[in-house]
Amino acid sequence: MSATAERHEPADVGSDHAAKLALARAIEKPGEWALFLDIDGTLLDLAPTPDSIVVPETLPADIDRLAKKLGGALALVTGRALLYADDLFKPFQFPIAGLHGAEIRDVDGRELFVAPSPEFLALKQALMREAESMPGVLIEDKGAAVAAHYRLAPQFEEPLSQRMKDYAHAAGPDWALQIGKFVFEIRPSRASKGDALERFLAEPPFSDRLPLAIGDDLTDESMFAVANARGGCSIRVGRRNASTCAQQTAESPAHIRQAIAELSQ
């Protein structure tokens, strides 16, 4: 299904209280709702580097209890590689869409991975070499995707943007450039977080449920659009003046974690 939604400025109704009420409504009617959660900037506070992210000690168990309350209809939808995301929440393994939907593990544990081509592997090596001349730019090798983070070196945003466009063009039609918060990423083109939601919603226990999608970045807009089009709910974490198609906002990941902790009891 193709889902589109008008982008708008979130109104005052998009508050942390409203976001918590949306989560509470899903818990009160667990057979009617499916929950989809981004990780970085949504569940976890953003950090200067991808590897310096901190997972609060109680969060994995809180998510697991919440998933059980929802009859298993909870999935993580992230730009992280599937195996890397698993490591964040061990010992628990949740249904997950990694690399913006290019990698999938369903509720039964079946996994689908995208294999990078030799040409893409060579492209990643070339990017890593070139980034050595941009101090502070960090290259994250995600397997079938590669990300260039410039949070520590914002002065390189413009030249890095052009170079990543060049690399994405060289990678060919099977890869696309994805823009996020202080990051440019080249990822498989036949995947998006919206597509991931559609895939999950086609199978039990997600099927025939209303989607509640929570994210924080441009990469999450496609899943917000799907949630809206299916009569569900969408929440964007972060600045309330950010242009988004999300119906509500929450101020920070801390508010999302607190709501999950309280509602999972």
Image: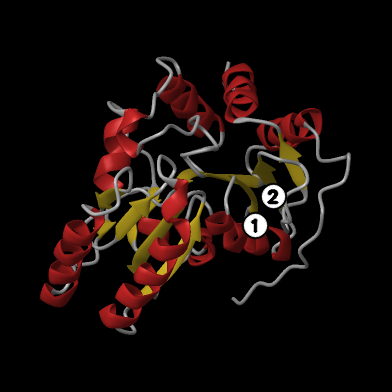
User: How dense is the environment of label 2, judged by Cα within 10 Å: few (below 14), some, or many (20 and up)?
Assistant: many
* Scheme of colours in the image: secondary structure
Q: For residue 14, which numbered disc appears in the image? A: none
Q: Give, as a three-letter code, the residue at label 1.
A: Phe
- Under circle 2, the secondary element is strand
What residue does disc 2 label?
A: 234
Report which residue position mark 1 lands on: 224
Q: Which quarter of the rendered picture does the N terminus lie within?
A: bottom right
Question: How far across and down, in percent of the image, does residue 100 sit?
Answer: 42, 58
Q: Is residue 203 visible?
A: no
- For residue 104, above or below residue 254: below
Asked whether 49 or 163 is in front, the reply is 163
Is label 2 in contact with label 1 (beta carbons under 8 Å)? Answer: yes
Taking the view exactly as shown, the residue that stands out farthest to the bottom is 173
Please, is residue 237 above or below residue 131 in the view?
above
> Can residue 60 be seen?
yes
Q: Amino acid at mark 2?
A: Ser
**Residue 41, horizontal then vertical, whole percent:** 53, 38
Instruction: Please name the residue shown 77% across and 50% down the image.
Output: 247
Residue shown at 27% from the left, 49% from the top: 140
Instruction: State the residue at coordinates (34%, 54%).
Output: 148
Q: Nearer the viewer, residue 140 or 60?
A: 140
